[in-house]
Amino acid sequence: MRASLTIKQILILAVTLSGLVACGADMDELDAYIVEIKAKPGSGIDDLPDPNLYEAFQYVADKDGIRSPFRPDTPQVAGGSNRIRPVLDRSREFLESFPLDTLGMVGTLHIGETMYGLLRTSDGLIHRVVPGNYLGQNDGRITQISESEITLVEIISDGIGGYIERDAAVGLRD
């Protein structure tokens, strides 16, 4: 068994060496081609194309219905800005650390007159919520719980220093 392994190794070594020898042979054609290319006279560099001339645009606000880029395009509430703001001095609830898309409604629970919504978090735990609880990362406050979904109102930035309310829902998962 040991002798046949040595013969295999010798054959592999012989094939490898013959391949390497074949790679280094007959470089005459390549050397002749390189000499031919170097013998040709060099050509000049093409002239640069003429640059495109910059055409200035005279901007006149409110002309031809063009909105000024320095004024917000959202209507302002009378009195300067809207009154919607997140409540900053309240203590945060546990479910506010989860994005809404990672929460799933798994059912409801009736205890007495109170209907609870049951939410499963991404870590697999189930939590009870009632209207008025907060959840999600955008100051979402639960407004209603039904058999099929939990509706809430989120407070998000409007991009110009104020806030707007946005309706959202967490639906019942199958």
Image (cartoon, helix red, strand yellow):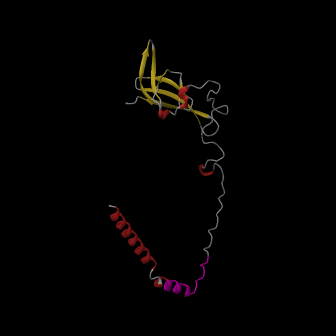
Task: Classify 130 as above or below 84.
Answer: above
Q: Residue 106: image x %, image y %?
A: 41, 26
The quadrant of the image that shows the C terminus is top left
Which of these two is toward me, 16 or 166? Answer: 16
Task: Classify 156 as above or below 61.
Answer: above
For the point 65% across and 44% down, the residue is 71
Q: Quick one: which residue is furthest to the front in this view?
A: 2
> In this image, 82 relative to 4: left or right?
right
State the image quarter where residue 44 is shown: bottom right
The quadrant of the image that shows the N terminus is bottom left
Tell me if residue 115 is in the magenta stretch: no
Q: Residue 114: image x %, image y %?
A: 46, 15
Which of these two is toward me, 158 or 114? Answer: 114
Tell me if residue 45 is in the magenta stretch: yes
> In this image, 56 relative to 118: left or right?
right
> In this image, 151 relative to 161: left or right?
left
State the image quarter where residue 22 is shown: bottom left
| Residue bounds of the magenta highlight | 31-47
Q: Residue 5: image x %, image y %?
A: 35, 63
Q: How many marks?
A: 0
Which of these two is toward me, 20 or 49? Answer: 20
For the point 63% across and 70% down, the residue is 51
